[in-house]
Image (tube, rainbow, N blue to C red):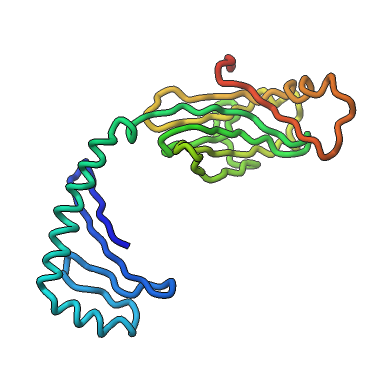
Amino acid sequence: MSGCDWDDETGEVKGYEHYGFDGEDFLILDLETESWIAPKRESFLTKQKWDKDKAYMAQQKNYFTQRCPEFLKKHVNNGRSFLMRTEIPSVSLLQKSPSSPVSCHATGFYPDRAIMFWSKDGEELHDNVDHGEILPNHDGSFQMSVDLDVSSFPAEHWDKYRCVFQLSGVKEDQVIRLDSAVYRKRNANKSTPSPASSSELTERLNQPSE
């Protein structure tokens, strides 16, 4: 594994090259000391041999501190409009059954620097909340979910709860209200549902929230 990191704010550049064997580190390049680190006893002889090759070390240092960052800066500049884009997600409320947690699901957002949480009366909730990981979509965007256990909440208090989505670089939060009437409306015209059936509580972001 090899590559370089470039901090576009500080200008700091870091290069790295790791060799592994059988799932474990075997040799690690240390550019600061211009030597190789041998994490295992079996790699020590190779370390000694490679440490003596000063020409190869100079070549590696030049590549990882000069050429590699130049390539990286070029690619970042060429793809800046794509990499720096902002995509607002679609946010929905999902519930498999009346006794299941309500999942607030956001999909289609970019970049992945985002947070989502449940709140009540403007205060973030921590109890009865389960945060999911940010996951990639096939189109390069991302998705995430945060579940709220509503089993102990009186239905008449549901409208006090909000799901809040915040995306880096976007000032306006996206807020969706938990409405107990949604589930009842969705099922009002249905016959007795099968235990295996699922219902979806969906409110789009263009609906006004209180």
For this view, does 205 lie left or right of residue 39? right
Which x, y percent locates residue 99?
78, 38
Which x, y percent locates residue 72?
23, 46
The foreground one among 110 and 59 is 59
13 w.r.t. 104: above or below: below
Residue 200, by quadrant, is top right
* Residue displayed at 67% across by 32% down: 94
* Residue displayed at 33% across by 35% down: 83
Position of the N terminus, as image quadrant, is bottom left
Which x, y percent locates residue 134?
50, 43
Which x, y percent locates residue 131?
57, 43
Q: How many marks?
A: 0
Residue 27, by quadrant, is bottom left
For this view, does 199 lie left or right of residue 51? right
162 w.r.t. 61: above or below: above
For this view, does 10 lie left or right of residue 158? left
Position of the C terminus, as image quadrant, is top right
For this view, does 132 lie left or right of residue 52? right
Residue extending farthest right: 192
